[in-house]
Amino acid sequence: MLRAPEQNSSIRLRGSRLRGSFPPGAVKKSLKYLRRRPPRNKSSSQRPIPIFLSEEKSGEQLNKVIDGKLLRNEHLKTIDLSKLESLTDEEADELLHTWELWARPNQLEPAAVLENGEHWVTWLILAGRGFGKTRCGAETVIKWVREGHCKRIALVAEDSADARDVMVEGESGILACSPRDFKPKYEPSKRRLTWPNGAVATLFSAEDFDSLRGPQFDGAWCDELCKWRYAQEAWDNLQFGLRLGEHPKQIVTTTPRPIRLLKDIILRSDTAITKGSTMENLVNLAPPFRKQVVDRYLGTRIGRQELNAEILDDVPGALWNRMMIDETRIRPVDAETPIALPHFMRVLVAVDPAKEVDKKKSEKKGVDIDSGGGGYAETGIIVVGLTQEGHGYVLEDLSFHGTPEEWGQVAVMAYDDWAADLLVYEANQGGEMVAAVLRQAAKSLKDEGKREADFVPLKAVHATKGKYVRAEPVSQLYEQKKVHHVGYFGELEDQMCEYTPDGSMGYSPDRMDALVWGLTELMVGSIPHEGLLDYYRQEAQAVKDRLSGKTDETYAINNAAVPLIPPAGINVPSITYGMSGVKYDIDSEGIFHVKEEDVKPLEAAGYKRFFAKVPG
């Protein structure tokens, strides 16, 4: 079914209405079929399409040849649909590929001259998921080529896979949007598209920003700029190459993130800006998307960014902010000089394992918008290193949605690629199952000949404190300028800068969790009297809860561990275990802090409660 956007018209054109009464010799098929038919006569496709508009006042038919913009302005509902049956195959195909007919007004290229009198160089489309950014970019590039404005074009995406799968071969990519008489020849091995008029587009990965050094262009399309790991470097090299023709120009399609480069582009006087939200194209999106994504995230902070395309600044109460991360970020000196990493005393891979999504709880907890992996939430996999000077480096973010077998292999391969000395994993989710998955992954990779040994050193870490309390010491390391991000990690940094203790971000920050586990293992030592500090913090929270109306019972259920001292007259153990299998470490004061359900069994074994004396 061909559907005109609601903003343009209330009419929906169905292929069945176009069947019958074709010219002699034409096959009576729907437009969907016509898209695949080779042109019978190329010359006929060059004719303007006659569309008859009905004039209600006079009752006479106005035989007008109009373009797409006039057609939209005259309202599609005035079309006499019966006249569409007289179109030839070629005319129907051209109608189907007339972007001005189907586009919403904010998907059409702006006027060449801006209000300030300058010709725009960059058309920046800031829009939410599902707005139609990719379709807009593809149609605009086709228009530039067909009208002869651009002959050498750069297609730049986050990586080579996105350039191929989204910009070229995607459902809204260049190949799908091209009319059959003007479809480019695609050569994947050469990363090249060649049109019938000789124009050429070359695919580039922003990760390989040095490849943009040298080629010249008169047009460019940058997709999802805010996701690029080396955004500034790739953008700078592209600008140096955008030097052909009288008015070289580029289109940028992206969901916004508050990165410095995006703000710089917005502030330029030669930038034309178009904003749009997911809601504008909701009628063309799948019902499951509307239910699972739009309904869940609408009104939340992540929804404001991903759906409404708002550029969000720092979150009040968050442990990190963008400036804190940017100040110590490691960037390439220039396009010819790669990043020189220091010598690391230790390198480890931190894993925050995923669990299978509970559909009943998903409405409350939520998962990331791009959830996948067979019903599993996102697994955080972060590689970090420590130098002799005591500085930490975030080296790679490999987090993704996947099954245990998949993320197990990714984690072990990261361990091998970075010659790490340890693989740290959170044991609260799955316990020994996580260790078994990682060991099995190592064995499988050995059997496949991808590694020499089936052994990988593992360390389990347990979350005995809240997420916010665990992250505070790591945040302080950033404030002290002791942690450096090697490049840009968009999704990880979004989670860091959005996380607040009230959990208002609306999803689980699995990448941030893995980062905290890794840097804690490398850089955060045991704090003197940590157990007593936790105990006093918990007592203070209890008083605060009582004053706010919470009962002691509510506090006992939701809050901190009970301090116990081991039996006298025995060698004091450094660890003990509860009935649930949770391991408890002794603090520097000789105190264990255990869960409420483990208190009675340990008291039966001789442990006693510890009561701090209040001074005075």
Image (cartoon, rainbow, N blue to C red):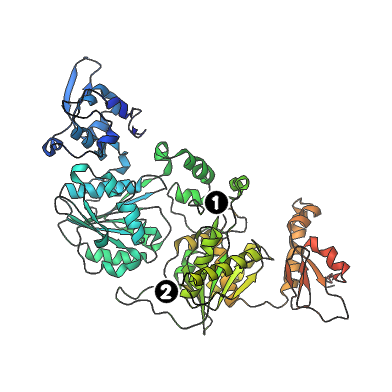
Q: Position of residue 314 (x, y in %)?
A: 50, 59
Q: Is residue 610 left or right of residue 154?
A: right
Instruction: Write down the residue under mark 1.
Output: 375
Please provide percent x and percent y for residue 46: 13, 38
- Residue 93 in the image: above or below residue 560: above
Q: State the image coordinates of residue 132 (x, y, percent, origin top left).
A: 36, 45
- Image quadrant occupied by the C terminus: bottom right
Report whether 269 appears left or right of 152: right
Q: Residue at x 51, y 54 (%)?
A: 373
Q: Residue at x 42, y 39 (%)?
A: 282
Seen at 61% across and 76% down, the residue is: 524
- What x and y, as percent, mark residue 377? 55, 55
Residue 476 visible in the displayed image = no
* Quadrant (top left/top right/bottom left/bottom right) for the N terminus: top left
- From the image, tell me which residue sits under label 2: 330
Cα separation, mark 1 vs mark 2, equals 36 Å
Q: Earlier in the sequence, mark 1 or mark 2?
A: 2
At label 1, which amino acid type do we have? Gly
Q: Secondary structure at mark 2?
A: loop
Residue count near mark 1 (Cα–Cα under 10 Å), binned few <14, some 14–19, many ≥20:
some
Q: Secondary structure at mark 1?
A: loop
Q: To which quarter of the image does residue 41 belong?
A: top left
Type of the residue with mark 2: Ile
* In front of the other: 336 or 431: 431
